[in-house]
Image (spheres, helix red, strand yellow):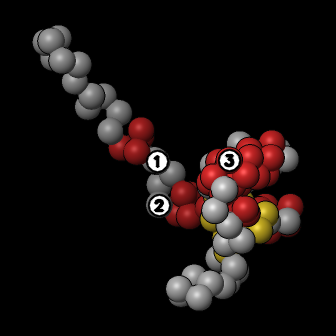
Amino acid sequence: MDLRLYYQKIREASSKIADAFPVVVSKETADGGKDGILNEVTRAIAAKMLVEGLARLASAEESAALRQEQAARRAATGGGGPAHRHAGSAAVAGRPTT
């Protein structure tokens, strides 16, 4: 495998992806990968998955459906992410806590 060509393909694929966090749809693979699973990933991971043939970019409708489902899940569970749950609990080394 020519690594220069491989990484060039990844850079090209990455430059064609508009979203910072695109939604990809998995493809079935011989090692057990399931077809049709939606995931929101970074641009770099999406480009790698596209080049390796593991996924395709989701359509606008598929992306919107995933994000609506995520929003509904967040609303049902209280809406707080890690920053919300741990607000005010971070200690800075060398500073006394008050």
Q: CA distance from mark 2 to mark 3?
A: 45 Å
Q: Quadrant of residue 38?
A: bottom right
Using residue 72 as the reference point, say whether residue 77 is left or right of it.
left
User: Label 3 amino acid?
Assistant: Arg
x and y percent of residue 86 in the render?
Answer: 32, 39
Residue at x 80%, y 46% (from the top left corner): 12
x and y percent of residue 44 in the render?
Answer: 65, 48
Q: Which residue is mark 1?
A: 80
Q: Residue furthest top?
A: 95
Q: Which residue is mark 2?
A: 77
Closer to us: 29 or 80: 29
How many other residues sit within 10 Å of disc 3, few (<14), some (14-19) or many (≥20)? few
Vertical position of residue 89 compared to residue 20: above or below: above
Using residue 53 as the reference point, say whether residue 75 is left or right of it.
left
User: Label 1 amino acid?
Assistant: Gly
How many other residues sit within 10 Å of disc 2, few (<14), some (14-19) or many (≥20)? few
Any part of residue 57 in sight? yes
Q: Which mark is residue 4?
A: 3
Residue at x 40%, y 45% (from the top left corner): 82
Circle 2 or circle 3, nearest the eye? 3
Q: Quadrant of residue 57?
A: bottom right
Closer to us: 26 or 8: 8
Using residue 25 as the reference point, say whether residue 96 is left or right of it.
left
x and y percent of residue 96 in the render?
Answer: 13, 12
Instruction: Describe the element under mark 2 as helix, strand or loop.
Output: loop
Q: Does the residue at mark 2 contact the one at mark 3 (Cβ under 8 Å)?
A: no
Q: Does the residue at mark 1 contact the one at mark 3 (Cβ under 8 Å)?
A: no
Compare marks 2 and 3 and give the one earlier in the sequence: 3
